Image: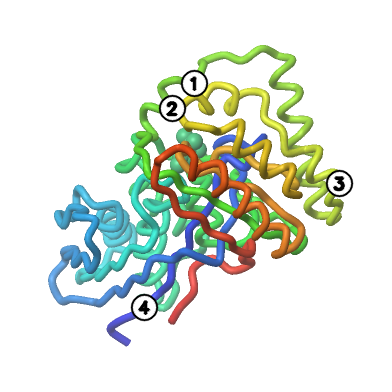
Amino acid sequence: MDEVSVLAPATVANVVCGFDCLGFALSEPCDEMTVRRIDTREVRIINRDDYGLPTEPEKNVAGVALLAFIEAAGIDFGFEVEITKHIMPGSGIGSSAASACGAVVAANRLIDDRFTKLELVELAMAGEALASGSRHADNLAPCIYGGFTLVRSTDPLDIVEIDFPSLFATVIHPQIEIKTSEARAMLPKEVPLKNAIRNWSNLGALVAALAKADYGLISRSLEDTIIEPLRKSLIPKFDEVKGASLQAGALGGSISGSGPSIFMLSETPESAEKVGEAMSAVYTTTGIDFNTYVSQIHPQGIRFV
Ligand code: HSE
């Protein structure tokens, strides 16, 4: 086998009260990636989309992850990677994570799955560091494991897979740019203890509620008293979108990643569709272009095709 193709899904991280730790995988959109073994110990990038991402491996998220992979595997050959991105860079739904994870998962298949999922997340973190300047794994973990994951620690890396019931996500992506590095720079170094208590209480409850399929408790736990109040100022009409979504039947939601996307969770696909309509109704008044996605929370991460 000299070539492996994968679909690398979009992911939502910072699941409300789970900033930098809780994430989940969507069914779509997905990036299409094919990784081929080449005889020379180097990485070659072929972009098959119009995003104009760099082709120098050191400047490309998939390239950096593959360079780390080659180093860790100690192999004397390299890889060519062909990428068709469907997850728009900078959308806040794990575009860079999909590129990094798709590359290392496909390359791993070419060396008989030598690395574990945990090790692959560790290698893909090199890509996230290039994209945002910080080694976070909250999008990488669900991209590789699927479903809901919690990153308990990044050093050493410790990932917890969370049981979850049938859930649907609605995402609206306003076409404005928010740089993750800037959205991180605006966060406080310290938080008041009462806000911290509220958030870790909500996060514990949310994880328990997901495992018990307690939709009422899921809804009550989807509350963030630390990050959302600050970052929502970056997203036009955030409060209106959230309010209309809750009124349309959403369980709750917040900013996806560092934005500009906003996501909402629903118990049924019908409700998720209604939430999409409510979000769109708010955004059509802004004059800002936007896309919406409705997707099941997908139990599998990267899929081989
Ligand atoms: N957890 C990160 C942040 C994810 O919100 O800064 C960004 O993709």
* Location of residue 247 in the rendering, given as x and y in whole percent from the top left corner: 74, 43
Name the N-terminal-most of marks 1 and 3: 1
Ligand 1: does it lie within 8 Å of the C-beta at label 1? yes
* Amino acid at dot 3: Gly
Depth-wise, is mark 1 or mark 4 nearer the camera? 1
- Tell me the residue at 49%/21% (across/down): 187
* Location of residue 201 in the rendering, given as x and y in whole percent from the top left corner: 78, 30
Which numbered disc covers residue 216?
3
Depth-wise, is mark 1 or mark 3 nearer the camera? 3
Depth-wise, is mark 3 or mark 4 nearer the camera? 3
* Amino acid at dot 4: Ser
Name the residue tied to disc 1: 187
Ligand 1: does it lie within 8 Å of the C-beta at label 2? yes
In the rendered image, is residue 294 in sight? yes
* Amino acid at dot 2: Arg
Please tell me which residue lies in front, 211 or 218: 218
